[in-house]
């Protein structure tokens, strides 16, 4: 399959390496508004370099594009590719507003093509096993969930032309770093029906236009409740913590480890962190290659890729509602829309 990667920044490394290792894909084109970045990746992977997305679409016959650009471009670029009859694998967030999510879902449905969203942590062994256990019902119904992201960013991180900006990043820790954890919270704990949230800029006030700290209270459709906390003001990038309380015990995910905790408080390690080669930061998880391989398996076999605009858009819906709640000071109902 002929593939193009749009955006040659940090996260694109995960995509380039996974595509290069996949026997079913050929990287034929790359695009970036910074010519030196596009030229470098084109030379590295034997592809053609473009400095404009529209020019690439006009000149290439593609099976799929990978979109790894700043957030504000995700939905418009994805819709344009779908309208051109091209499959899309889209970095998170898929969209930056409820309106965009609905537009993306409509475009995917109308195109007949497959749109996939990169929530790669769903492919971590600990998450897959936790999901299996929860769905089996052997530990009973979900009662509550708590999730914490305590990471570190510095001034240098915000020294480029888009991180920390409202018009391009379109949010901070909530929409960028911790949306993965929000996705896992609702994937494992249950879909969200209402959220009350607060976001603030605690560490980088006066430096960035977006939040570096966020917390939320979620009401889930199954009757469970969840609390969520994320910050970039910590001193290190610690492992993400998610704990699901069930009727017959608890499941705790710490990074890529999974523990079960019985009613007496006894811990049992179910999965350990696997020995993998990380193409990016280790705290991004090890699932990018597995997700990308699964996506292309679905394209080749005709099966439906699970994390599409509907499923993958749910975390973005929650994030959009969190921002609205924080702005208005009221709980916000989550509606699926299209």
Image (tube, rainbow, N blue to C red):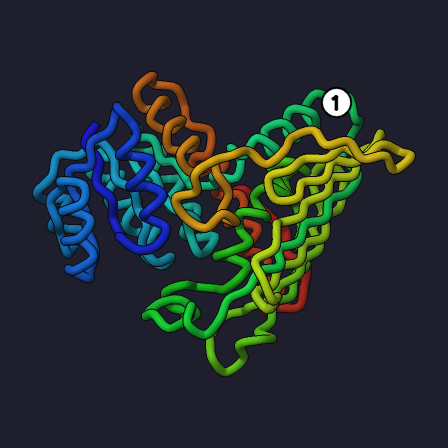
| Residue reaching furthest to the top | 301
- What residue appears at the point 58 percent right and 75 percent down from the top-left corner? 203
Quarter of the image with the N terminus is: top left
Where 323 falls versus 270 (above or below)? Answer: below
Q: Which residue is mark 1?
A: 137
What residue is rendered at 24% in x and 42% in y? 81
**Residue 22 percent coordinates (x, y):** 29, 28
Viewer-nearest residue: 336 or 175:
175
Query: How many neighbours does mark 1 have within 10 angstroms: few (below 14), some (14-19), or many (20 or more)?
Result: few
In x, y percent, where is residue 111? Answer: 29, 33
- What kind of element bears circle 1? loop
Identify the residue at image location x=34%, y=51%: 74
Is the residue 262 above or below the residue 337 in the image? Answer: above
Quadrant of the rendered image containing residue 142: top right
Q: Is residue 152 left or right of residue 11?
A: right
On the image, which quarter does residue 277 sit in? top left
């Amino acid at each position: 399959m002929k593939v193009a990667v749009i955006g040659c920044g940090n996260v694109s490394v995960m995509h380039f390496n996974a595509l290069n290792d996949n026997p079913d894909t050929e990287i034929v084109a790359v695009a970036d508004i910074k010519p030196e970045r596009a030229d470098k990746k084109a030379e590295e992977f034997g592809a053609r370099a473009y400095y404009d997305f529209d020019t690439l679409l006009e000149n290439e016959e593609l099976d799929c594009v990978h979109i790894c650009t700043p957030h504000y471009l995700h939905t418009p670029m994805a819709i344009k590719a779908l309208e051109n009859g091209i499959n899309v694998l889209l970095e998170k967030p898929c969209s930056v507003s409820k309106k965009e999510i609905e537009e993306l879902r409509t475009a995917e449905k109308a195109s007949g093509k497959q749109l996939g969203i990169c929530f790669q942590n769903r492919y971590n062994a600990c998450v897959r096993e936790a999901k299996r256990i929860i769905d089996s019902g052997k530990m009973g119904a979900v009662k509550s969930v708590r999730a914490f992201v305590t990471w570190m960013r510095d001034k240098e991180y915000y020294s480029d032309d888009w991180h920390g900006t409202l018009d391009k990043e379109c949010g901070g820790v909530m929409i960028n770093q911790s949306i993965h954890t929000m996705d896992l919270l609702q994937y494992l704990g249950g879909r969200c029906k209402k959220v009350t949230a607060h976001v603030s800029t605690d560490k980088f006030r006066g430096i960035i236009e977006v939040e570096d700290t966020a917390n939320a209270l979620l009401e889930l459709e199954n009757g469970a409740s969840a609390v969520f906390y994320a910050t970039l003001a910590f001193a290190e990038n610690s492992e993400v913590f998610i704990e699901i309380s069930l009727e017959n015990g608890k499941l705790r995910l710490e990074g890529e480890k999974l523990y079960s905790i019985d009613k007496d408080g006894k811990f049992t390690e179910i999965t350990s962190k696997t020995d993998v080669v990380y193409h990016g930061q280790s705290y991004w998880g090890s699932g990018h290659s597995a997700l990308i391989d699964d996506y292309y398996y679905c394209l080749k076999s005709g099966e439906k890729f699970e994390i599409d605009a509907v499923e993958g858009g749910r975390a973005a819906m929650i994030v959009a509602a969190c921002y609205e709640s924080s702005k208005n000071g009221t709980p916000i109902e989550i509606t699926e829309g299209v």
